[in-house]
Amino acid sequence: MKVNNVETINKVGEKVLLKGWVNSIRKMGKIVFIDLRDKSGLLQIVLVPQEMDKASVELMSNIKPEYVLAIEGEVQARGDKQINKDLATGTVEILGKSLKILSESLTPPFEIDNEERQANEELRLKYRYLDLRHERMKNNLIKRHKVIQFCRNYLSDRDFTEVQTPVLTKSSPEGARDYLVPSRVHKGKFFALPQAPQQYKQLLMVAGLERYYQVAPCFRDEDARADRSPGEFYQLDMEMSFTDQNELLELVEEMFTAMIKEIFPEKKMVTPWPRITHEEAMSKYKSDKPDLRKNKEDKDELAFAWIIDFPLFTDQTKEDEEFVGAKGKWAPSHNMFTRPKEEDLKYLDKDPSKVKAYQHDLVLNGFEVGGGALRIYDAKVQEKVFDLIGFDKKQKEYFKHLLEAFSYGVPPHGGIAPGIDRLLATILGEKSIKEVIAFPLTSDARDPLMGAPAEVTKEQLKELGIKK
Ligand code: ASP
C-alpha cells in the first residue's frame, strides 16, 4: 500500500511503497536524486544502480520532471549534515530498490515551482491543473476546505441546518446583472442564476427553520475589476429568526475567532472586534471598509471590524456603481430587504437620506468580507422601500410571493453572508481571490481551460426558441 511522503519520517529502516510526481531530478554520475511530490509534500529519493533491480536501472535514464512514479525503497535516516530543515521530510531519504513509471509527462508550459509563472494569468488558468500542483496553491485549497469544514461543524453544533436552495431560479436582485438560462420547455422564458439565496433564506425563516446556513454559490455578471473574480463566488450564507443584530454579530465573531485560532494559529488579531458606525468610519477613515491594521507590513496581523448603522439608501446620482434594478434617486445601500431602524421610520417620507438601517458589514484589513442585515418583515414598510427605490408595478409584482409569504406569519429575522473567497484570500494575504478558487474565471470572465463561455449550435438555439 502507498505510504504518504511525510509518513516516512516515522518509518526509518522500513520498506515502503511511494507514489507521486517527479518534482525535480538531479543526476550525479550514476546516482540519481529525485524529489518526489505527493499531496503531503516532497521527499528525496536516491537511486543507486547497484541497489536496484535490473528493469528499474534501465528505466532510470528515462525519468523526467512530472512523470508519475511508483518507487519501492528503504527509509534511511539522513546524517546530521544532510538534514534539510526546509523540508517536512528533511530528516530522511529513500534508498530506491525498484521503480515503475506509471505515466509520462510532456514538458509543462511553466515551471511548477517557479512563482514567476503568475505573471501570465491566461497560461495559469489554461493549465490550472498544473498551476494547482504548486505547493502554495494546493495548500490554499486545503485551507479552504478546512475553513468550510470548521464553519459547517460550528454552525451545525448550534442547531443551524444547511439547506441547498435552487440554482435555477428567478433573480434575487442584489444590485448586479443576472446570468440567464433559457428554458427549453417554456420557450421565451428564462431562469436566472441567483446573485444570492436571499429570498429563499427568508422564505426558510417563514417556513420555520429558524437557523439556516449554506455554503452557497452566488452568480453575478459584473464587469471586470482587479480585486474581483467575475462570475461566481461562494458565501457562507446565514439567516436566523427571533434574533437581534448583537446576537448575529457575536455568533459570527466567535465562529471566525475560533476558526482562525485553530486553522491559522500564527495570525494575531485584536478581540473583541471594534464596532464602528458608518458615519464614524466615513468621517474618521474616509472609507466604509477601513484598514485598521497597526502594521501593514506584518503579514500575520488581522484587523476585523464591524461597520454598522449604514444609511438605508445611497443616492444613486452620486455613486459610480449602478444598483441594477433601482430606477429612482435612492438605491438600497445593502439590499431592498434591509430593515430601517424603528426610530428612523418617521424619516422615510420626509427625508430618506436620514434613515439608518440594521445593516452590518464585516471588514478585514481594508476589505469587505461580508454583509448582512436584519430584514423588513412588515409588508407596508417593504412597499414603501420599493416605492423609494423607484420600483414600478411590474417590478413590485416580482416580489409578490415574498410579501404573500410574509402574510402567513413571518418571524422577525436577519442574517449575513461572509464571502468565503474574499475572507480566505485576505487571511492568507493573497493578492487576488483567484488564488483561493480552484477554477476561477479570467479577469474578463472566461475559462481558458474549458473554453467557456462558448458558442452553441444552431440546433440548440432553435430548440431553446432563441433562433428560428
Ligand atoms: N444576500 C446578501 C448578500 O449577498 C447577504 C445578506 O444580506 O445576508 O450580500
Image (tube, rainbow, N blue to C red):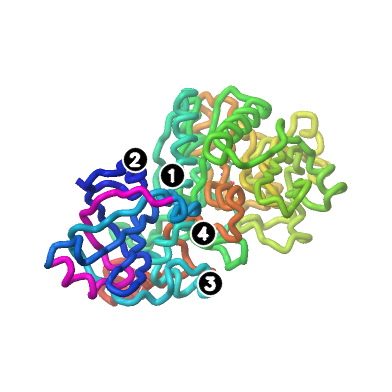
SS category of the residue bearing label 4: helix
Instruction: State if disc 3 and disc 1 touch (CB < 8 Å).
Output: no
Which mark sits nearer the N-terminus, 4 or 1?
Answer: 1
Residue under label 3: 116
User: Would the CB of label 4 be found within 8 Å of ligand 1?
Assistant: no
Between the residue at mark 4 and the residue at mark 1, the CA separation in whole angstroms equals 14 Å
Number of other residues with Cα within 10 Å of mark 1, as a class: few under 14, some 14 to 19, many 20 or more: few
Number of other residues with Cα within 10 Å of mark 3, as a class: few under 14, some 14 to 19, many 20 or more: few
SS category of the residue bearing label 1: helix
Which mark sits nearer the N-terminus, 3 or 2?
Answer: 2
Q: What range is drawn magenta here?
A: 55-79
* Amino acid identity at mark 3: Glu
Q: Nearer the viewer, mark 3 or mark 2?
A: 2
Q: Is residue 8 above or below residue 159?
A: below
Q: Residue at x 74, y 60 (%)?
A: 319
Residue 435 image label: 4
The image quarter containing residue 130 is: bottom left
Residue 10 image label: 2
Q: Nearer the viewer, mark 1 or mark 3?
A: 3
Image quarter for ligand 1 equals top right
Residue under label 1: 145
Between the residue at mark 3 and the residue at mark 4, the CA separation in whole angstroms equals 14 Å
User: Would the CB of label 2 be found within 8 Å of ligand 1?
Assistant: no
Instruction: State if disc 2 and disc 4 touch (CB < 8 Å).
Output: no
Q: Is residue 58 magenta?
A: yes
Between the residue at mark 2 and the residue at mark 1, the CA separation in whole angstroms equals 27 Å
